[in-house]
Each structure stands twice: as structure tokens, then as C-alpha cells.
Image (cartoon, rainbow, N blue to C red):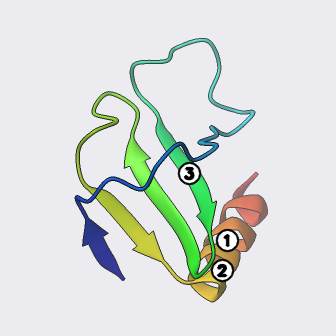
Amino acid sequence: MSIHRTAVGNLPWFKSSYSGANTTECVEAAFVPRGVLIRDSKQPEGPRLHVSPRAWAQFISGAAHRN
């Protein structure tokens, strides 16, 4: 896991369908060749967390089992 501050171009960022209408308190994710970038939607130019494909899959699996 690492934090990136460098520009990565125009990535297709997305939010969870469970985010609702409140766009001020959400995280966004974007798929990149070596994993997933995650950012705070309130600070789209701020730092981005980079996680591996395996870490992302484990996160999604864990979140799905909580619902």
C-alpha cells in the first residue's frame, strides 16, 4: 500500500452505488494497471491510496459480507 500525490491523468473514478446523494462524504476509486487508487471525493487533487488487486478484492469481499 502506498500514497500517491502525482497526477495520473483522467482516470474514470467511481463511487459505490450505496453512496447515496451526499457527494461530500465519500471515497472514490479508480482501476489502474497494478491495482486500485482510492481518494477522498472532497479532495480529488489530494493524496491517493494505492492498493493491490488482491487487497481491493479482500476489501470488497469483506464489505459485501457486512450487508
Query: For the residues carrying marks 1 and 2, which lies nearer the camera in this image?
Result: 2
For the point 30% across and 78% down, which residue is it?
2
Question: Answer yes or no: do the residues labelled 3 and 1 have beta carbons within 8 Å?
Answer: no
Callouts 1 and 2 close, C-beta under 8 Å: yes
Point out which mark residue 58 bears: 2
Kind of residue at disc 1: Gly
Q: Earlier in the sequence, mark 3 or mark 1?
A: 3
Mark 3 or 1, closer to the camera = 3
Q: In the depicted view, which residue is nearer to us: 34 or 39? A: 34
| Alpha carbon separation for disc pair 3 and 2 | 15 Å
Which amino acid type is shown beneath numbered disc 2?
A: Gln
In this rendering, the answer to whether 28 lies above or below 49 is above
Name the residue furthest front: 9
Secondary structure at badge 2 equals: helix
Q: Nearer the viewer, residue 21 or 33?
A: 33
- The residue beneath circle 1 is 62
Q: Mark 2 or mark 3, which is nearer the start of the sequence?
A: 3
Horizontally, residue 2 falls left or right of residue 53, namely left
Q: Is residue 43 above or below residue 38?
A: above
Q: Quadrant of the N terminus?
A: bottom left
From mark 1 to mark 2, how far is it between C-alphas?
6 Å
Q: Give residue 29's mark.
A: 3
Q: Secondary structure at mark 1?
A: helix
Q: Residues within 10 Å of mark 1 (few under 14, many from 20)?
A: few
Determine whether 56 is above or below 22 in the image. below
